[in-house]
Amino acid sequence: MARTGRRPGATDTRDEILDAARRTFSASGYDGATIRGIAAEADVDPALVHHYFGTKDELFVTALQIPVNPAALLSGVIAEGPEGLGERIVRTMLTVWDSNDANPLLMLLRSLANEQVAPMMREFVAHAIVRPLVEALGTPDAQVRATLAASQFGGLMMVRYVLKVEPLASLPAAEVARIVGPNVQRYLTGDLSS
Amino acid sequence: MARTGRRPGATDTRDEILDAARRTFSASGYDGATIRGIAAEADVDPALVHHYFGTKDELFVTALQIPVNPAALLSGVIAEGPEGLGERIVRTMLTVWDSNDANPLLMLLRSLANEQVAPMMREFVAHAIVRPLVEALGTPDAQVRATLAASQFGGLMMVRYVLKVEPLASLPAAEVARIVGPNVQRYLTGDLSS
DNA sequence: GTCTATAGACGGATAGAC
DNA sequence: GTCTATCCGTCTATAGAC
């Protein structure tokens, strides 16, 4: 099955453009990325990009189709049974993504991140969310705990207010708080090694 | 303190532009929002926007300065003590944001969300993350549980890979999995009413 | 304070030569 | 298959009249 080396008789310009597109979309976001920029990154003419992939939107969608199917990966992890599932999922996700930037979900997330807004966002999270929590906790591991809590806050807002995934988007605030609260509490004051 | 009605002798065009900017940035994202669009929303000439706020970037920053200081809000919640802090924070956040769209953090988040990418993202989360989990769980509340897990995944990716907030961005995958795993596990198979 | 007019730049997309 | 040339639209930003 291994297919090493360059196949003779065919150029791989198309794949090079695709790779360049993935890198550029991930780095600059969908809006920030330009056809011209992608072409420069791939060292080809901008017209070639259109020639192979049509519109910018089609290129983006094509760039999302990646060999490694994340759903299949997830299914594999699930198949090992419910015990310790949470830890296995997180470890698998992070391990894959730490080592592999060409990842569709990561590319999607980074494509969301506008270059000018992302730094403001980090600033905001650090100052308005993490810092007050760190001061309130006052423990050596406060920074980790506060950041973990922030990750849950951020994900909740993402799912509820931006992506509006049901049923979480429509659940009453009090009910969500009742369910999510204990998890945040564990991050802040609970035993993290258990 | 109440200030009802329009004050005589001064126009409030500036505030109207600012409000329009907040609405537009929240709805369309930073890139998607245009000075022209904001001006139209405020029913004024585009040049006026520049006149009052300078560049688009300055307008964005100004729009972020909101009367309600989220850090102060958070401090108030923290001051009530560590017991039940997690639930109180989540409830306070959601309650404020459910009723008030003119919120800086929410505006930042939505400004991240490109109009073309956000739907793809929702699709991806629903199909590649939530659906496999729902099928694996097979319980009536599987949808809620899977969405909650997705919220933690998303927040983690946001903090670790997009915003790169330390120390969470540099922690080894295995350690993050050990810490975050139990929280995900609770969402998937734990008792949500406790 | 408000608007008209426009400069100036950029990016997506296409036609067509080679 | 690849590139040149270019059209066309959109945007920010400014100068200046009223």
Image (spheres, coloured by chain):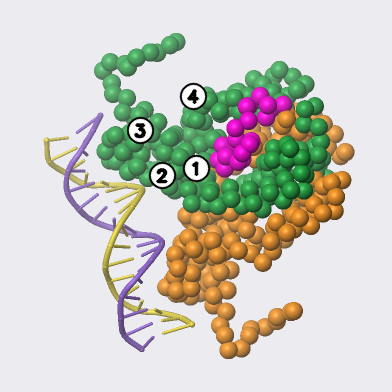
Chain colours: A green, B orange, C yellow, D purple
> What residue is shown with label 2?
A33
Q: Which mark is residue B82?
A: none
> What residue is shown with label 4?
A67
Viewer-closest of B9 and B97? B9
Residues tagged 1 and 2 counted as in contact (Cβ below 8 A)? yes
Q: Is residue B162 magenta?
A: yes
> What residue is shown with label 1?
A111
Where residue B158 sits, quadrant-wise, is top right
Q: Does the magenta stretch include residue B62?
A: no
Which residues lie in the magenta part?
A: B159-178
Chain identifier of the residue bearing label 4 in the image = A
Q: How many residues crowd around disc 1 within 10 Å: few (fewer than 14), some, or many (20 or more)?
A: many
**Quick check: B186 above or below A147?**
above
Residues tagged 4 and 3 counted as in contact (Cβ below 8 A)? no
* Residue at 47% across, 38% down: A26
Residues tagged 2 and 4 counted as in contact (Cβ below 8 A)? no
Asked if residue B188 can be seen in this view, the reply is: no
The reply to the same-chain question for discs 4 and 3 is yes
Q: Which mark is first along the chain, 3 or 2?
A: 3
Q: Which mark is first along the chain, 3 or 4?
A: 3
Viewer-closest of A144 and A73? A144
Q: Nearer the viewer, mark 4 or mark 1?
A: 1
